[in-house]
Image (cartoon, helix red, strand yellow):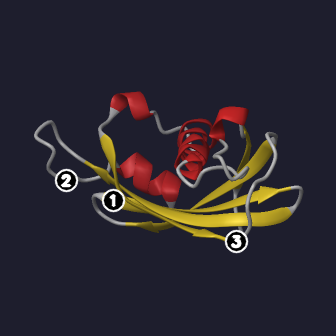
Amino acid sequence: MFEYTRTVAVRYQDFDTVGVANNATFATLVEEGRRYYLEDHLGISLDDSRVVLAHLEFDFERPVTEPTSVEVAVRAEDVGSSSFTLAYEVTQHGERIATAQSTQVAVDDAGRPRDLPESWRDALA
């Protein structure tokens, strides 16, 4: 069950010459879902920490063929000591378009993994 959903616009410039939303657009769509899930839904400020995207994967089921909006649903799947994994479902007009999974890692100023704050682990659990 997804615990948060965000409506995200798919713009005309997101489409390629074939007339479908370019696959790279989906990284931006889930990024917006991730940001608002963490900040608005869980209260985790991304301005106060260093978190990097370590892994991002997609499974595409059908194309987006019109500039409109999609729904990006987000949930936490796994929380480790320095990283967490989120799952996404992108839908349009009630039909699943794509699923995705991302892993984010908390890093220190030198770019090395560091422990997630306890408050983050609690919020993501």
Other residues around mark 2 within 10 Å, as few (<14) / some (14–19) / many (≥20): some
Other residues around mark 1 within 10 Å, as few (<14) / some (14–19) / many (≥20): many
Contact flag, marks 1 and 2 (Cβ < 8 Å): yes
N-terminal label among 3 and 2: 3
Rendered position, 87 above or below 30: below
Q: Element under label 3?
A: loop
Other residues around mark 3 within 10 Å, as few (<14) / some (14–19) / many (≥20): few
The residue type indicated by label 2 comes to: Pro
The residue type indicated by label 3 comes to: Glu
Q: Would residue 70 appear left or right of 18 to someone viewing this image?
A: right
Q: CA distance from mark 3 to mark 2?
A: 34 Å
Q: Quadrant of the N terminus?
A: bottom right
**Residue holding disc 1:** 83
Badge number at residue 113: 2
Q: Element under label 1?
A: strand
Q: CA distance from mark 1 to mark 2?
A: 8 Å
**Residue holding disc 3:** 61
Residue 36: quadrant of the picture: top right
Please name the residue shown 63% across and 46% down the image. 16
